[in-house]
Image (cartoon, rainbow, N blue to C red):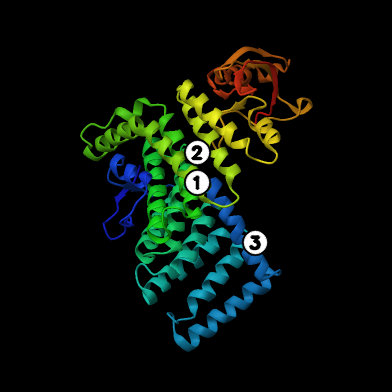
Amino acid sequence: MYILVEYSNATKPRYPDSVSTLALLMNKLSAPVCLLHCLCCALVLAAFAASAEEEAVDANTTGPVNERAYQDAIARIESTQGAYGAGLGEALLGMALALQSQGRHEEAISVFKRGIHLTRVNEGLYSTGQIPLLQGEIASHIAARNYALADERHRYLYRVQTHGITSGHALTAAFLQQAHWQYEAYQLGLGDQGYNRLMNMWDLYRLALNDVIAREGENSPDLLTPLYGMLQAQYLISNYQWQESDQGYGDDVRARQNLHRFTAYQAQSYQKGNAVIAAIHGIEEKRAGEELAAAQATVMLGDWRLWHGDYDAAVAAYSEAQTELAQQDDAQTYIARIFGEPVVLPDIDGLRPLPPITAPERADILLEFGVNERGRVINLERLDENEEQDGRAIRLMKKLRKTKFRPRFETGQAVETEKVVKAFSIQ
């Protein structure tokens, strides 16, 4: 079930009077922001749990001893200040992290909850002092596989963040954090109607972008993080595969509205992606010593266009990128690195469609194929004889035939590449 919450005007960052072309385009194309507070996903929160455990261990290499020290501190504060003593929140956080570092997650959750309740009573409903306690509780819920409870607590964490943090880098970080969780939840297939997560991912990155523009202006390098997130979202939005369950809403007005909104998002995706990449290029171009990064942004533009079947526009972007690269001291090295062999698209971390490539001797599946000058796979053959992987090999070959590549270039021209051999590790 998706929980969608509309931002109030008080929580929406505003653009400054002078805004970029991208900012204007975002305002024009984007519907009112409805944000989904996600079901916490194992990948992201497992990573957070690990960092929390590292923090606890750093503070104390002998967990049980530290645990007793926190118990003693809690008892002293309670005896002198009562059950809601001002110093209890910090002591409870330390105690919970100590338990968490030992893998005692159910006990840690109980202590985290007590700390959250105490902090809420002492400091207010949306006090930011709850944030580390909530994050710790969520991490332990995930470690204990209490996913539904983690989802519930994460929604509350988001309310605390957006009410308690009114401006500054911390608010931007909260938007970015939530956007990344939307991406992870979508990749894991958590919940129904995944397109809601993609809209929320885009909207959250856009809020982060607006916040940085308002604080730092239109050319700040800090804009690059939300911009790259927005591009990632556009790849996912444009490639979303409709499910039968996406249509069955009956009398659910809000669900129908979201469905229509996503249809508009998909229709605008190509234009939005072009605008995002243009903004990335503009920022990199203005940064001293980042000419290579600007050229790589032009390559990204070519990739985006080719991935959408706009071949002539893609080739024009690739040619422009090679002209930009030619200005570098190691021009031939960079050109060869980027255009010397076919590259699978999207060429973005987290979106590459094929399994990991490995050494042939460790491979589960070994394939040979060609890539023509338009980036299409041709002459696909299987070279291995691993019968145990027949089913997976068939599915992989089917996916590979649909995968687009940035073609190899020679003397500025896209050319066909024969006998590309790739060894895949199937996890």
Q: Residue at x 29, y 38 (%)?
A: 258
SS assignment at label 2? helix
Q: Is residue 17 above or below residue 279?
A: below
Comparing 11 with 214, the one in front is 214
The type of residue carrying mark 2 is Leu
Q: Residue at x 60, y 16 (%)?
A: 394
Q: Which residue is mark 1?
A: 41
Mark 3 or mark 2: whose residue is earlier in sequence: 3
Q: Earlier in the sequence, mark 3 or mark 1?
A: 1
Instruction: Report crowding for label 1: few under 14, some 14 to 19, many 20 or more residues within 10 A (C-alpha).
Output: many
| Label number found at residue 229 | none
Q: Residues within 10 Å of mark 3 (few under 14, many from 20)?
A: some
Q: Amino acid at mark 3?
A: Glu
What residue is at 41 percent from the left and 27 percent from the top?
241
Report helix, strand or loop for mark 3.
helix
Q: Is residue 328 above or below residue 143?
A: above
* Corner quadrant of residue 374: top right
Residue 252 % position (x, y): 23, 37
Residue named by callout 3: 54
Q: Quadrant of residue 422?
A: top right
Q: CA distance from mark 2 to mark 1?
A: 7 Å
Indicate left or right for 408 with 198 as reference. Answer: right
> Toward the viewer: 332 or 364?
332
Q: Earlier in the sequence, mark 2 or mark 1?
A: 1
Amino acid carrying label 1: it is Cys
Residue ID for mark 2: 188
Residues at badges 2 and 1 in contact (C-beta under 8 Å)?
A: yes
